[in-house]
Image: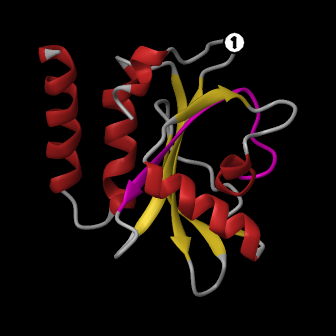
């Protein structure tokens, strides 16, 4: 448990060093690489007025982040499902092949494969979004990894 707290403390320290999340995401991804099989990290903001999710930051451990689809529109029913999942605070993890869980259909951009761990972030009363951890090729997330999300 102490190791988990130390990792989280280091992540928060890095996040607090920068005003913009895009500035800290690369460093946070590198920190998490020591504890997660992460190949890429995406931070997406839920934009309720425009009924979409927007990628606001991303990080990869071995260089500059390559922009993914920046905006994903969603239907009213998908947005309701996403917000309900966010309220529950559930961390989801698993393969992105086949049928994705409903909340993931909108949260994870099209064209992303492999394994993912998806976690709600923020507060629905203010800024809300999701963080998506994409597993390094041929690796998977475990329930222990979910404790870091």
* Outermost bottom residue: 49
Q: Is residue 86 above or below residue 113?
A: below
Q: Which quadrant of the figure has residue 11?
A: top left
Residue 140 lies in magenta, yes or no?
no
The N terminus is located in which quarter?
Answer: top left
Q: Which image quarter: residue 26?
A: top left
Left or right of 39 in this view: 109: right
Q: Give SS at disc 1.
A: loop
Give the left or right position of residue 90, taking residue 126 as reference. Answer: right
Point out the residue furthest to the right here.
98
Q: Residue at 73% x, 64% y: name it.
A: 78
For mark 1, what is the residue? Answer: 138
The residue shown at (22%, 21%) is 4
Around disc 1, counting alpha carbons within 10 Å, would you say few (fewer than 14), some (14 to 19), or many (20 or more)?
few
**Residue 30, image x, y percentages:** 36, 31
Specify the color scheme: secondary structure
Q: Which residues are magenta?
A: 108-122
Give whichever of 125, 21 is nearer the camera.
Answer: 125
The correct choice, above or below, for 67 with respect to 2 in the image is below
- Which sits in the foreground, 29 or 106? 106
Q: Residue at x 73, y 76 (%)?
A: 76
How many badges with numbers are in the image?
1
Where residue 24 sits in the image (x, y, percent)?
A: 31, 51
Residue 95 position, x and y percent, is: 72, 26
Query: Which quarter of the figure is the C terminus placed in?
Result: top left
Q: Is residue 51 above or below residue 104?
A: below
- Horizontally, is 45 left or right of 10 in the view? right
Residue 7, image quadrant:
top left
The picture places residue 29, in percent across and down from the top left corner, at: 40, 36
């Amino acid at each position: 448990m102490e190791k988990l707290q130390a990792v989280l403390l280091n992540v928060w320290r890095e996040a607090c060093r920068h005003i913009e999340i895009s500035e800290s995401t690369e460093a946070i991804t590198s920190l998490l690489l020591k504890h997660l099989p992460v190949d890429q990290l995406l931070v997406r903001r839920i934009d309720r007025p425009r009924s979409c999710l927007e990628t606001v930051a991303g990080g990869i451990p071995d260089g500059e982040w390559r922009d993914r689809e920046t905006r994903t529109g969603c239907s009213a029913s998908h947005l309701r499902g996403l917000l309900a999942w966010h309220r529950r605070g559930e961390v989801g993890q698993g393969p992105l092949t086949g049928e994705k869980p409903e909340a993931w259909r909108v949260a994870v951009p099209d064209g992303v494969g492999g394994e993912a761990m998806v976690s709600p972030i923020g507060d629905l009363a203010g800024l809300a979004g999701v963080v998506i951890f994409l597993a390094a090729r041929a690796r998977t997330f475990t329930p222990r990894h979910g404790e870091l999300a």
